[in-house]
Image (tube, helix red, strand yellow):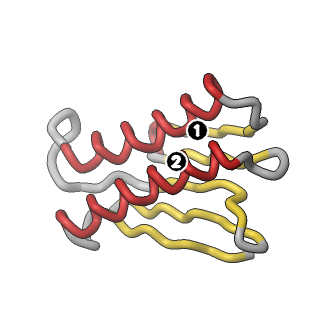
Amino acid sequence: MTEIEIVKHDGEYRGFECNGHSGFAEEGEDIVCSAISILTINTINSIDHFLEDKISVTTDESKGMMQCYFMGKPSKEATLLIDSMKLGLESIAAQYGAGYLKVKIEEV
């Protein structure tokens, strides 16, 4: 199962962590894992390419781990991108079930 924790502080996003593989299908055929990867990686790439927000990204593909944290207060545009990613991830969890993807919002 993939677990995604979206971290907020005082109502603002601070970043997110993604851990694990969904286990929906074999590697290379896992559409749930692919969809999760597309949403999370595209969000990171969009923030990095289109915005001036500074982020710190750490990955470990073998563990299915990805962390992305803002180095300051996120812009309105970055907030919208995280909202969009969250919407997509929650849709995947609703369609395929909590056994493959769990999305959690953590207020710190």
* Location of residue 39 by image quarter: top left
Q: Give the x, y percent position of residue 27.
A: 22, 39
Q: Residue furthest top?
A: 49
Circle 2 crowding by C-alpha within 10 Å: few under 14, some 14–19, many from 20: some
**Residue where numbered disc 2 is placed:** 65
Q: Are marks 1 and 2 in contact (CB under 8 Å)?
A: yes
**Residue where numbered disc 1 is placed:** 59
Amino acid type at circle 1 is Thr
Q: Secondary structure at mark 2?
A: strand
Q: Is 6 drawn above or below residue 108 in the view shown?
A: above
- Looking at the image, which residue is at 35% across and 47% down? 36
Amino acid type at circle 2 is Met
Q: Give the x, y percent position of residue 40.
A: 46, 43
- Looking at the image, which residue is at 39% across and 59% down? 87
- Looking at the image, which residue is at 55% across and 29% down? 45
Q: Give the x, y percent position of residue 25.
A: 15, 49
Quarter that holds the N terminus:
bottom left
Left or right placement of residue 97 versus residue 42 in this view: left
In depth, the one of 12 and 36 nearer the eye is 12
CA–CA distance between discs 1 and 2?
Answer: 5 Å
Q: Residue furthest right?
A: 72
Circle 1 crowding by C-alpha within 10 Å: few under 14, some 14–19, many from 20: some
Q: Secondary structure at mark 1?
A: strand
